[in-house]
Image (cartoon, grey):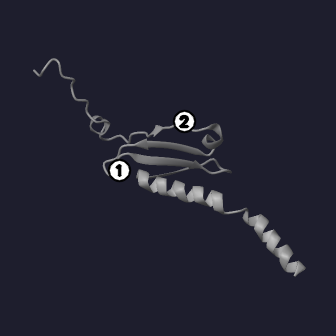
Amino acid sequence: MGDSTSVPEQALASEQYPDEDLEPLWLKLPAELAAYFDLGFCHTDIICPCIVLRVRDDTTQAPVEVSGPPSAFLGLAQVIAALCEAVPCLLHDARGEAALGEAG
């Protein structure tokens, strides 16, 4: 018998269910993102927390799932944010250059 005032240790989910893949804990995303993405995290023996991103194809709605360490997703988010701020519409720029070439 142990100390009656202590709280018993809870076994890790991976120890309780060793043969099961645990479903990620999915975060609630805003509706405009949830139509395309699911974002969650889970524990793995290699990465903890492991970030999970599920992306749905626009036309087929078939999901593709990628996962990795938080640092990788932070780096990806920074690149996406920089692109959104720096890259103009490529179609608009191509038409503008073509018009300048015809005028010159």
For residue 35, above or below residue 58: above
Badge 1: residue crowd in 10 Å (few <14, some 14–19, many ≥20):
few
Q: Is 50 positioned to the left or the right of 78 in the image?
A: left
Residue 8 at x, y percent in the picture: 21, 25
Residue 63 at x, y percent in the picture: 56, 48
| Of callouts 2 and 1, the N-terminal one | 2
Mark 2 — residue? 28
Q: Are dots 2 and 1 in contact, CB under 8 Å?
A: no
Residue 18 at x, y percent in the picture: 29, 40
What amino acid type should be assigned to the residue bearing mark 2? Answer: Lys
Q: Residue shown at 38%/42% (left/top)?
A: 21
Mark 1 — residue? 47
Residue lying at the far left of the rendered structure: 1
For residue 59, above or below residue 102: above
* Picture mark count: 2
Q: Residue shown at 54%/43% (left/top)?
A: 38
What amino acid type should be assigned to the residue bearing mark 1? Answer: Ile
Q: Is 35 positioned to the left or the right of 43 in the image?
A: right
Which quadrant is the N terminus positioned in?
top left
Which quadrant is the C terminus positioned in?
bottom right
Badge 2: residue crowd in 10 Å (few <14, some 14–19, many ≥20):
few
Element under disc 1: loop
Q: Nearer the viewer, residue 16 or 70?
A: 70
Element under disc 2: loop
